[in-house]
Structure formats: C-alpha cells, structure tokens
Image (cartoon, helix red, strand yellow):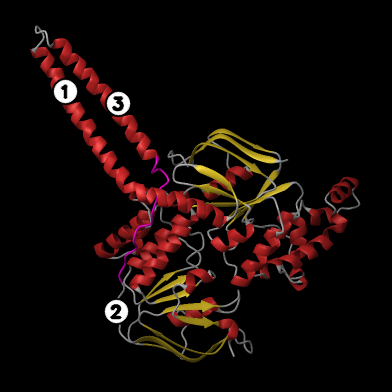
Amino acid sequence: MAKIIFEKVDFHYPEIYTPVFEKVSICVDTQWRLGLIGRNGRGKTTLLRLMSGELSPTAGKIKRDVGVEYFPYHYSGDVEITLDVIKECIGGLYSLEQHLEDPDSLERYMELDGFGMEGKIRKEAGKIGLKDSVLERKFHTLSSGERTKALIIALFLKQNTFIALDEPTNHLDIHGKEELGNYLRRKRGFILVSHDQAFVDHVADHILSINKADITIEKGNYTTWQDNKRIVEEFERRTSENLQREIARMEGSVVQKRDWAEISNKQKYHFASHSRTNGVQAYFAQAKRSEMRISKNIEEKKKLLRNYEESRELLFEQEEKEGWLIKAEDLSFSYVEGESLIRNLSLEIREHDAVWIQGKNGSGKSTLVKLITGEIAHPSVCYNGDIVFSVLPQEIDMGTCKSGEEFLKRELKGEREYGGGLQICGMFDVTEELLKKPCSTYSSGEKKKIYLAQVLSRRNHVIVLDEPLNYMDVMFRRQLVEAFTVLRPTVLLIEHDDFFLRNLATVIVNLDEQI
C-alpha cells in the first residue's frame, strides 16, 4: 500500500526564518480521500507543495511511493484544442501522437494507453459535467470552471499519481461544485484543501487538520472531525477561564516565592555567624525548588489550552443614507448585438439590504455588478445622490506594495481609515508583525483578509463582495456572518456558498431565471 511519509519535517521560507512547520511527522495512505483543513496562514498550501516536491523541507525527510501532482495546474503549452490539451497533460500524449513512427515514442504511447485514452477522456468528461462540444473548443475560450474540470480530468488519468487539490471549487457555481463533488466522491488517492464544509463532507473519508499547536489525522468526514472538535472545544471553553485564573495565581506565586528567596538570600549574610544560617539557606533552596515546580505546572496547564481558539467580534462602520440607494428599471445589456446577457431586470437597493446575485458561470453576475456600481454606465440605473462603493474584487492584487502595511497606507486615507484598517486586521488575527512581512509570503487567505480590512474600513454606502469566501477558513466565515447579521450593512454579494448567503441575503437576484 503506497504512502507519503513526513519524518520530523521542518520548513521555513528563505526570506522569513519563522518556521511554518516544526518536527511534523505524518503518514498518508495514497488511497484516502483526504480533506486538509486549517485556518488561513497555517500552511495548508505549503504542506501540499512539500508533498508534491515543489518545496523541499528545511530539515527532516519526505518519502513518496507515488508521484504527487499539484492543482491549480496552469497549462502553458502550445496545444489549442481542449481534448489535445488534456492528452498533453497526461504524460505528453499529444506530442507522442505526432511521432508514432518513432519506435520509442510508440512504446511510450502504448505504455500510457494512448490508443484508448480519448475514450477514457470523454467518459471522464461526462462524469465531471463537461460536454463533448467543450472538448472540441480551444482551451483559452473555456470558462475558469471548465478549465478546472478539464485539468482535473487530466490529473486523475495519470498513472501512479496522488493528487493535491488546492481550493478546486474556487470560481465554480453551485451546480459546478456539485458536479465536481460527485466526481471526486467516486475517486480515490487525493488530498483536498477546501473551506466549504458541505463539499468536504461529501467528498472526504479522512481529515488532516493543521491546528494551532499540532497536526492531526482522523478517520471520517468534516462533520465527524467537527463533532470531535466541538467536544474538545466545549471542554476547553468551560475550563479556559478557570485555567487562566489558576495560571495567573501560580504566576503570582512564582513572583512571591522569588521575592522571598531573594530576601532570604540577603538575610543569610546578616546571619553568617549565627546558627540560623543553615536554615535560611535551606529555605532559599526550597523556594527555588518551589518556583521550578510551579513553572513546570504552569506550562502543563497552558498545554491544555494550546488548540483553543475563538473568533473575535468583527466591528466596522458604514455611511448612512435612508431610503432607496440604487434603482434599475427594465435594465437590459449585451456585449454582442442580438445576444442579451441581462434582460428586463428591475431592482431597488435600499439601506441595510443584502443583495445576493445568483447565476451559473457566464450568466452575467460580474457584469451586473459593474452596471450597478457605474463601472459600466447605463441610463436605466439611477442613484439617490452620491453613492460610494467599496469593492472586494474576485482576484486580489496588491500591486507593487512590498507589505500589507504599505498596502493599507496606500489605499486608506487619513488616520481614521488607516487605524480602522489595522483594527479590522487585528479582528481577523492578522497581526502587525504579519503586516510588516513581504506580500510574497502571504497565503491567499491572508491577502484576502488584508484587502477586505481596507474595504470595510473605507467610507462607503455599499460594500461589494465578489466571491469573498474563496480561500477563507470556516471561522472567518462564521465571523463574517455574525458581523453582517448584527451590523446589517448594505452589501452586494456574488457568492456560490448557499449556506453562507441563506443566513444573510434579504434580496435575491437570480440571473438564471430572467424572462
């Protein structure tokens, strides 16, 4: 049975000496459907890259009985047609097809089952929800969701390969996620990073969790892991306050014992010729032993809380404007004459509305946001005075900024906005130390939290969030839902996580149901 084994693995990035992992020892069965979970910045992507060999450990060893392929996989070859791209990603099959007169090429082609591969590709495409017509199109014309599915097919058709999938559901609509989930459910031999609880629940049979203080592997799906975690959390929640009080008391006792010992140590010289000298020395030694014993006890108590964590309350402000903010009446729009992308849409956005824009990939969600925000001017859209939008884009780009701190200073105006950005970063567990680090060292989730912090801290009447949950951990999602439920900002949302939005949305615009 093939395995991937980490033996006391340490890792840190060259530019930062703070370790990402220390003494990690895990054993992964390559037949598992393994879900990888953990908060943003814990090293999930780093672990996958170590597993695939893209990164090398600073210390320790990683043993692999199979090849490991990492996704997102970015195809950059010259092949154009999607079917041929998939073939090329399976060991260079398309290139081999061009030279079958060469005996070595023919032999390799046959080893990879080249003559039967097209049939396998079409069968897999049907399972994952790709039409035959998509396979005949040029690869660069496919949507991001279609490209994701095509490349995942290629990876699973490779021989003797374990697949590392890093957030494969990003940019997939609800139907696309369902198709991918059903596909992965029928496969074995992969590790999946996803913060979508329902998706991981459906797919995984084991969970690898990167916790605050350790890494664990448990049999079962996300719900099984969460139920076990909830039991531990409930215990820690009940005991943390008492433990903190006990730790504080013991730390105070350490200080007291140390003070007494120092006083006694000084007094022994005063009594140097006195019979009590030995008694003072004994007391001094006893105080030192007591301090060591208490210090050890403190460390043991702190270990009980090492994985205990809770999300902070998220607070931010929004400009007030009573009544309606934006209206659209009989809005229609197309990029190509005769092909309406948005048809006869009427919409009113009022203060405190949470507007959820639904639709399949390519249905016009992003275009509608551009029309509402005025990025695309249209006579059917009108505003109640000056409406200020604060936008979180789908793809995060910090430009030329060297650090998160520099990005916040560039984007936020005045001490109030900048101070608010720092406060919200703190609520997201993005520390000032992290903000000073190079942007190149941030995880995708950390980048998004920093960007969102500046979005929420800017003066605005409407917050626009385009797929805000991509790369974001479960605790963050809970934090965002609770804040939006309490504060009720006016917000425009594009998101494919229906659980998240069922708890927030007050207005639903479904572009799949246009008349």
Q: Is residue 308 magenta?
A: yes
Nearer-N-terminus badge (3/1): 1
Q: Between 336 and 435, which is closer to the camera in this rendering?
A: 435
Instruction: Give the percent coordinates (x, y) of residue 465.
Output: 45, 71
Q: Quadrant of the C terminus?
A: bottom right
Residue at image mark 3: 292
What is the secondary structure assignment of the residue under circle 3?
helix
- How far apart marks 1 and 2 lie (CA) works out to 62 Å
Quickly name the residue at label 2: 320
* Disc nearest the viewer among 3 and 1: 3
Main secondary structure along the magenta-highlighted residues: loop
Q: Earlier in the sequence, mark 3 or mark 2?
A: 3
Q: Which residue shows up at 44% across the image and 58% down it?
A: 475
The boundaries of the magenta stretch are 304-317
Residue closer to the observer: 82 or 129: 129
Question: In the rendered structure, are the residues bearing label 3 and label 1 in contact, judged by CB atoms less than 8 Å apart?
Answer: no
Earlier residue among tags 1 and 2: 1
Report if the CB atoms under discs 3 and 2 are less than 8 Å apart.
Answer: no
Q: Is residue 22 above or below residue 259?
A: below
Instruction: Describe the element under mark 1 as helix, strand or loop.
Output: helix
| Local crowd size for mark 3, using a 10 Å CA cut-off: few (<14), some (14–19), many (≥20) | few
Residue 456, magenta (yes or no): no
Q: Quadrant of the N terminus?
A: top right
Query: How many neighbours does mark 2 have within 10 angstroms: few (below 14), some (14-19), or many (20 or more)?
Result: few
Q: Which residue is mark 1?
A: 262
The mark total stands at: 3
- Camera-near label (1 vs 2) is 1
Nearest to the observer: residue 270 or residue 460:
270
User: Is residue 87 shown left or right of residue 141?
Assistant: right
**Quarter of the figure with residue 335:** bottom right
User: How far is disc 3 from disc 2 in space, using C-alphas?
Assistant: 58 Å
